[in-house]
Image: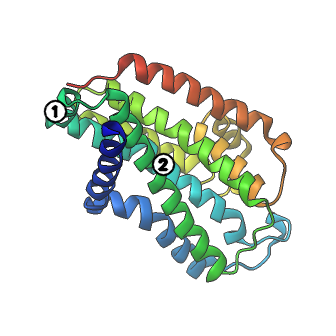
Amino acid sequence: MFQRNATHKLLLTQAKLYLREPMAVFFTLLLAPLTLIVMGFIFGNEPTPMFHGRGNLDMNLPAYAAMVIGVVGITTVPIETSSRRENGVLRRFRATPLRPLTYLMSDVLVYFAMVLLGVTLLFVLGTGVYRVQFSGNLLALLGGICLSAAAFLALGYVIASLAPNVRIATVVGNILLIPMMMLSGVTLPLEMMPDSVRTISQFIPLTHVVTLLRGLWFGEPFSQHVTELMVLGGVLLAGTVVAIWTFRWE
């Protein structure tokens, strides 16, 4: 009973702390919707032959969901975790009667919830305001989002575990995230990129998030995305193992 009540309070506290960070809230909940608004103002959503009769926003809305996942996993998790380690928060948590796994699970669940909240706001804006058409299965799309988020959260904890301090975690996170977003189809559709860039993009995990979510958004079955599922599943497994092995409380 103690563990259950403590877990509920810890989840609520973690969520409040997250929402009190203006930068975390902006990049998680507002960056992707603002990007959608700007791109909608510039390009609109008129069907084009390049996108096989779909509009720019039709193609990019799932990619902006990948932006939310990438930002939370690659930058927010390492920065927040490293900051708490430097400030002694993790050490104090470990000294409480709570099991270490309880803290880690509550941490993961809060980040998961923020990803889902950010993606939901984005999808509501896209479908409600810009009339972006959704032709997929909602449960399948949710499964793809959860797998992608889990894989990138695992990467984030690897960075947080290996970075010696919050400054290094910030630098490493940004160095990884910015090229990922530029080359994965998040900021510019892959159809508009040269063949050489598209070849390189296949080695970037975020590319497989974009491809998977876009396919599920348009109603493609998981069987057409075996490569994406294998890549993201591999990232999740490897990242989890490395993060567990290297995680430091102080």
Q: State how many labels appear.
A: 2
Question: Can you say whether 66 is above or below 158 in the image?
Answer: below
Q: Secondary structure at mark 2?
A: helix
Residue at (47, 54) in percent of width and height: 113
Q: Determine whether, in the image, residue 144 is placed left or right of residue 122.
A: right
Mark 1 — residue? 92
Measured Cα–Cα span from mark 1 to mark 2: 23 Å
Q: Quadrant of the N terminus?
A: top left
* Residue occupying image coordinates x 57% and y 73%: 39
Q: Which mark is residue 112?
A: 2
Above or below for 2 versus 185? above
Q: Can residue 75 be seen from the camera position used here?
A: yes
Instruction: Name the spot of residue 77 as percent of width and height, x first.
Output: 37, 42
Q: Which residue ends up furthest to the front in the rendered image?
A: 1
Check the image and report above or below for 241 versus 194. Answer: above
The nearer-to-camera label among 1 and 2 is: 1
Residue type at the position of mark 1: Arg
Labels 1 and 2: the sequence-earlier one? 1
Residue nearest the viewer, comparing 210 with 140: 140
Camera-side residue of 157 and 44: 157
